[in-house]
Amino acid sequence: MERDKQGRFVKGHNGLKMEKNPTWKGGRIIDKGSGYVRIAIGGKRYKTEHRIIMEQHLVRKLKPDEDIHHIDGNRQNNKIDNLQLMSKSDHTSLHHKGSTKPKPYKCKVCGVLTASKKHKMCRKHYKQWWQKQNGSYKKFM
């Protein structure tokens, strides 16, 4: 184990960065949360591989309102023939095509269309019902 000037143990490999560090794995990781491939671009910064590939293909930086769509749905398939440049709004529309808002329910007391599915009552009438059942609405909230 290596020690510093004060006699403390030195952790790691003397702060060697990226390629110089013997534990370096090439700077290509798969993000566990999103599933996208991320590439190290310096220090602790990473950028998604599909954005880098599209920028190289276009020979320009992507605009803030542009998104990249994976045609086959595989976020790790970053071949240029699988990537499609789209506006953010078009990309959102593509992925949410056919989705609808939840169906509103009528309150069984007054007929208002904001009732919950579970109790079939609007907030006002649910509060009154809860107070009758339990004595105080504030205990519930």
Image: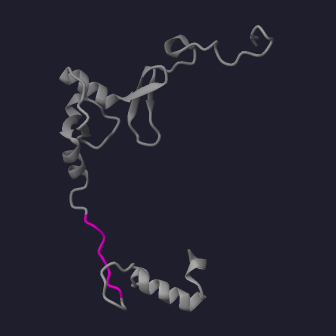
Residue at the image point whose x is 27% and y is 25% from the top:
53
Provide the major secondary structure of the magenta segment: loop
In the image, is 17 to the left or to the right of 56?
Answer: right
Is 131 left or right of 77, judged from the image as shown? Answer: right
Q: Is residue 105 above or below residue 57?
A: below
Horizontal and vertical percent for residue 92?
A: 24, 49
In the foreground, 125 or 67: 125
Q: Position of residue 109 (x, y in %)?
A: 37, 92
Q: Give whichever of 1, 45 is nearer the camera.
A: 45
Q: Does 60 appear above or below 117?
A: above
Which span of residues is magenta-colored?
A: 100-107
Identify which residue is drawn at 57% across, 14% down: 22
Colour scheme of the rendered structure? one colour
- How many numbered tags mark residues here? 0
Residue 63: % across, % down: 23, 31
Name of the residue lying farthest toward the top: 5
Q: Quadrant of the N terminus?
A: top right
Q: Is residue 51 above or below residue 98?
A: above
How far across and how far down the image is residue 13, in percent? 64, 14
Side of 78 relative to 31 (left or right): left
Q: Residue at x 23, y 35 (%)?
A: 82
Q: Quadrant of residue 33?
A: top left
From this view, report whether residue 76 is shown above or below residue 100. Answer: above
The residue at 25%/51% (across/down) is 95
Q: Is residue 58 rendered magenta in the image?
A: no
